[in-house]
Image (cartoon, grey):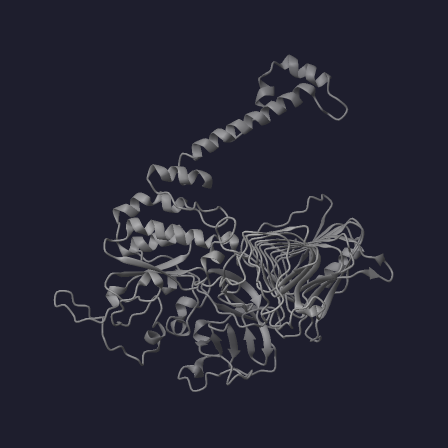
Amino acid sequence: MSHKDKRRFYNLLPSIYHQQDIEQQTANHHRPLQDLTDILEETLKTLEYDIEGLYENWFIETCNEWVAPYIGDLVNATLLRPAKETTISSKAYIANTIHYRKRKGTVAILEKIARDVTGWDAHVVEFFQLLSTTQNINHIRPENQCTPCIVDPELMDRVGGAFDLIPHTLDVRSIKTGQGYYNVDNLGIFLWRLAAYPVKRAHAFWHEEGKYSFSSIGIDLPLFNNPLGQCNDGLLEEINLSIPIRREAAKKYLKQYYGENRSILLETEDETGVIKPISAQQIIICDLSDINGTKNWNTPIGDSDCSSKKVAIDPLLGRIMFLEKTSIERRVLVSYYYGFSADMGGGFYQRNLFESSLDDIKKYLISTVALCSTSKHVSSIGEALDCWKCDGAPNALFEIVDSGTYSENIPKIDIPPGKTLILRSTQQQRATLSAAKQNPEIHTIKVFGGEGSCLILDGLLLNQNLQLKIIKNDSKLGDSNLKHLAIHHCTLTPTMTGDGRNSLVVEGNDYLTVTLNKTISGKISMRDSLSQLILKDSIIDRGQFIPKDFSVNSDLTTFTVQCFEAHIENSTIFGKSCFDILNFASNTIFTDTVHVKRRQEGCVRFSYIPPRSEQGNSASKMPRHYHCQPENENSSVIPCFTSEKYGSPGYAQLHRCSMKEISEGADNDSELGAFNQTYQSHRLNNLRATFAEYLPFGLRAGIILVT
């Protein structure tokens, strides 16, 4: 409702009261009667908004999420587990219930129900259509040929997947166990649990002459498809799903995957700063994997189309090769999509920006490209720090407005007492911080904080050659006493070199609180500090470093997390942990042994605690337990992950074959670990219950988790 008149009560009063109120006006321009009616006006607005909300809650399209199950009861469309606003809305399923029932039993509706209930991409396959059987003269299927064309690379690349077109012999095993697919009464519901996240105009990582990676930190990264929309008949094809791009599919349908507003786009910047896109006519899709385990990449030599091409792309590994050799290092901008399970680690998604309540905060824009003429900006973080010092180091916000790579050796960050420094990427961007190329060694970003100072990092990706270190003291400034270090939606890349280095180190600063939220980090060492560590919805990874046998007095580099006091919720920790005090741990997976020194205080609930280390010795020593797994040392319950390698789309995701004690063992009946808030088990249970109503009589459905 529009409130054009902000003081309706006051304006209804006679003018004589207005005049008397003006005469009683105080020195700070307050009028007693006017202030009273303003309070009444706010109460009126609250009532009006509440009435408006009650009216909107009559309709499924405009109602609040908590009202949706009640409206669903009217059409008998309730779900076993009502969805959460942070994951997926159930309003689409409830709103379309009548439409579903009119077309009950058709493949298109079953596919749409699967998407609406789970929020994941789905594709339904009638396996009896792919049976290798004798043709019926009244129902001829010319596409069903018992002998496939094995020289067709695109056809053979689909074998075993959701879009397999080759007929199969009869398989009588049950589809509900995930074993037998091809039978007369079987339907397969293929689900892709990963979402595709966009990356716009990021800097490609340069390896050597002509060789680049889409990933800004140089790791192999499968590229995902940007869905083009739904087909007219409701059935989706590969191009309509957020799934990994196959080499053969990209080669055959290149124009559907490459170009502006498509899944992949390459641009180059010349010496004058002019950015030019590379056309699809200059692109060739090929295999650029390593040759015999070496770092040498395959080259598309001998390809009939290679002579007219300039750039080779491998979508499976996320690699780029310029076929025209030149000694000049091109500046390549890449736009693509990558896959992950949730909004975590920073990325091109809508995140809740940390807005400081300080009124006197000064904003500095950082960008590698020129902004509009009215916006002043600097081109590096070091330059922004210099400007900040020249301005007297007030409360500051360093906002990086692009997704470029900032390769620089950042000097020591000195935060004055009582001041706050925020370093973040702007909304739906993720900047990459890396050490300068001329310095191949690990660069340490040292932070010194005065009494009551704060440092906040938000939406950043730190390469593995960077280490964040909160130092203990300074020869000129004395002891550091940083109050709060907050890291939101960031990635401190775990080590991939096996050197066992730490991503975050805290020395001294005994009253410091370190908070990691929606963050992926390498090893954390706070052993030289009495500060507190708070982990929420995060992943802590030891990287590829192989720890030694567990011992309290063993080499300190064996611990993934080591701190004095910890509070952990909905997180996954790969490797050993050591705490003096563990105040609280909930819905958390510890993949290796945990040692807590003070076990008389604190609580661990609904978590997985391994009874033995990976080497089979030294049981975990923890405070009192409540509903933790495994229940006894002889139990076979153990978490299993799709991938434990950072950079993989299924990184830290529970495997499809995970035991129920892990996949539904949290206090909210969701999974343990960092992806607890995705409610994957709730979505799958809702789908199984819903399909019982819409599945044709006599058919059996099996859920197949592809990713």
Q: Residue furthest right?
A: 476
Q: Nearer the viewer, residue 271 or 319?
A: 319
Residue positioned 30% across, 50% down in the render: 692
Q: Is residue 703 visible?
A: yes
Residue positioned 47% across, 33% down in the render: 53
> Which quadrant holds residue 542?
bottom right
**Taking 639 as reference, is 416 left or right?**
right
Where 213 sits versus 447, above or below?
below
Q: Position of residue 621 (x, y in %)?
A: 64, 59
Q: Residue furthest left?
A: 137
Where 134 sits versus 353, above or below?
below
Q: Position of residue 493 (x, y in %)?
A: 62, 66
What is the quadrant of the C terminus in the image? Answer: bottom left
Residue positioned 42% across, 52% down in the render: 683
**Taking 437 as reference, is 69 left or right?**
left
Q: Residue furthest bottom?
A: 302
Q: Nearer the viewer, residue 104 or 348?
A: 104
Q: Position of residue 57 (x, y in %)?
A: 43, 35
Where 545 sits versus 18, above or below?
below
**Taking 98 as reference, is 60 left or right?**
right
Q: Is residue 236 visible?
A: no
Q: Position of residue 390 (x, y in %)?
A: 80, 56
> Which quadrant holds residue 424?
bottom right
